[in-house]
Amino acid sequence: MPVRRWPKIGQLFLVLLLLTVTGCTLKAPVSETTLVELTEFSTRGTTPLTERWWEQLKDPHLDALIQEALGNNFSIKIAWERLLQSQGALQQTSAASYPTLTTGANGARQRQATDISTTESDNYSLNINAGYEIDLWGRVKAAKNAKKLEFNATKEDLQAAALSLSGKIASAWYRLQGQHLLLQLLDQQMQARQKALQIVEQKFRSGVNLYEDLLQQQQLIAAAKGEQLAGEIELKQLQLSLALLLGRTPDTANFPMTGFFPPEKTLPDTGLPAELVQRRPDVRAALLRVKAADQQVAAAIAEQFPRLSLAANYSTSTAEISDLFSNWLTNLAANISAPLLDGGLRKANIVVQKSVARQALYAYGDVVLNAFTEVEKALSDEQKYNRYQQSLIEQAKLAEKVRHNLLSHYRKGSVSYQRVLSAQISELETTERLLDSNWQQIENRLQLLLSLAGSWQLEQPTATTEQDFSHAYK
C-alpha cells in the first residue's frame, strides 16, 4: 500500500506558519504628525502670485536668462538624471510584484566509436520556469510604495533645484545691474571732483589756497580712480558668475546694462501658511520622504513573517527535434520560508527603519519651520528697507545740496576747502548707501517671492548621448 506523504507535509506547513505568526505581530508604521503650525502670516499682500515667480518683476531680460539657465545649467541636468535614476529604481522594485518567466534550450550530439561500428545520438531539451511570490503581508507592496514615494520626492527635488537656480540667476542679474549703476555713480563723482579740482587750482594760482588743499583734492581724485578700478573688477567677477550659472563659457560673459527694476509697492499675496506648505516643492519633497520612510517601516515589519512562493516548471527532452513539443513534464511547487533564529537581525532592522522615519519627520518639521521663517523675515525686512530707503533718499538730496552750496561759497572765499572736501565725501558715501539699500530692497523682494513660489512645468534639457561621452574621454 503506498505511503501518503502530503498530509504530513501539510501538517509541517501549518506548524511552521503558526510558529512564525505567533512570534510576530503587525504594527502600524510611524504616521506623519503636524509638528509646526501657523495660522496666518503677519502681513498679507494683494498682488496675485504667478506660476513663474519672476514674471512679477516684468523683466524680459531676466525671463530669457532663466529660461537659458534651465536648459543649460549642469546642476539642473544632474537633477534630471537623478530623476531618471529614481525612476529606474522604482521599476526595479516594482518588478518584484510580477511573476518571473525564464526559458532555456539545449541541443547535444553524442558520438561513440568502437572497433566494429560508430553510433551517433542526438538529444534536445527545452524548459520553461515560472515563479511568483505571494505578498501575504504586504512586504513587496510596501517596498514598491516606498520607491514610488521616493521617486515623487525626487520630482519635487528637481522643482526645488529649478526654483533655487532661478533665484540665483535673478540675484546675480540684479547685482550685476547694481554694479553698473555704481560705476556710473563713480564716473559722475569723478567728473564732479575734476571740476572741484579746477576751482582749487585757480585759487592756488591766485595765492588764496594752500598747496595742501590742492594735494588733498588730487588725492581724492586718485582714490576715486582706485574705486573705479575695484568696481570694474567686481563687475567682471559678477559677469563670470552669471555666465557660470547659465552654463556659458567665460568668453561669452557679456550682458547688457538695463538698470534696476524696483519692486512693486504692493506686496504679493502670501496666502495662508497651510497653502504655502502645499505649494513649496521642498516642503512637499520632505513630506513624501516621511511617507516613504513609513512604508520602509511596514516592509521591515513584514520581513518577520513567512514568505510563500509558487514555482512551475515545464520541460521536454527528445532525440528528435520534431518531437520536442510532444512530451512535456510539468512540476508545480509551493515553497514557504520563515525566519526562526536570526540573532535579532530583523527586529534591529525595524528599530533602524523607525529611527529613519522619525528623522524624516523631524526633517519635514524643520523644512516647514524654515519656510514660515523665510516668509516672515522677508515681510518684516520689506517694511524696514522701505523706511530706510526713504531716509537715504532724503539724505542724498540734502548731501547734494550741501555740496553745491559749499562749493559756491568756496568760490567766493567764505568757507574753507576742508568743508567742501568733507561735503564731497559725505555725498559719495550717502549715494553709495542709497544704491546698496536699493539692491537690498530688491534682494529682499526676490527672497520673498522665492519663499512663496511653487513649481511650474519644466522642459527636460537635451540628454547626453554616447557620442558626448566619447568626446569627454578624449
Image: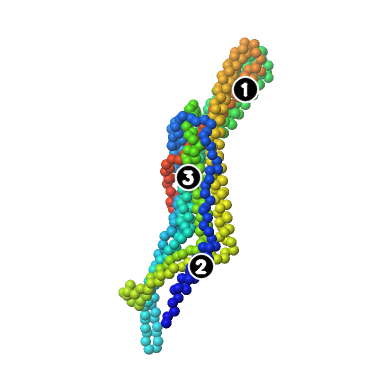
Determine the image quadrant of residue 320. bottom left
What colouring style does the render use? Answer: rainbow
Q: Disc 2 designates what residue?
A: 16
Please tell me which of labels 1 and 3 falls first in the chain.
Answer: 3
Identify residue type, mark 2: Leu
Give the residue furthest to the left: 322
Q: Nearer the viewer, mark 3 or mark 2?
A: 2
Counting the numbered discs, the total is: 3
Q: Residue at x 46, y 29 (%)?
A: 46
Please tell me which of labels 3 and 2 falls first in the chain.
Answer: 2
SS label for mark 3: helix
Identify residue type, mark 1: Ile
Q: CA distance from mark 1 to mark 2?
A: 91 Å
Q: Disc 3 designates what residue?
A: 156
Determine the image quadrant of residue 109. bottom left
Dot 3, how many residues are within 10 Å of its Cα: few (below 14), some (14-19), or many (20+)? many
Q: Nearer the viewer, mark 1 or mark 3?
A: 3
SS label for mark 2: helix
SS label for mark 1: helix
Locate residue 417 relative to residue 36 in the image: left or right.
Answer: right
Q: Residue at x 44, y 53 (%)?
A: 466
Residue 393, given in percent of the width and then of the height, sits at: 55, 22
Q: CA distance from mark 3 to mark 2?
A: 45 Å
The vertical placement of 18 against 4, above or below, is above
Q: Residue at x 52, y 33 (%)?
A: 41
Please tell me which of labels 1 and 2 falls first in the chain.
Answer: 2
Which numbered tag is attached to residue 31?
none
Residue 303, given in percent of the width and then of the height, sits at: 52, 60
Residue 439 visible, this angle? no
Tell me, yes or no, whether the two marked residues, 3 and 2, touch with CB atoms within 8 Å.
no
Residue 20 visible, this angle? yes
Which numbered tag is attached to residue 425?
1
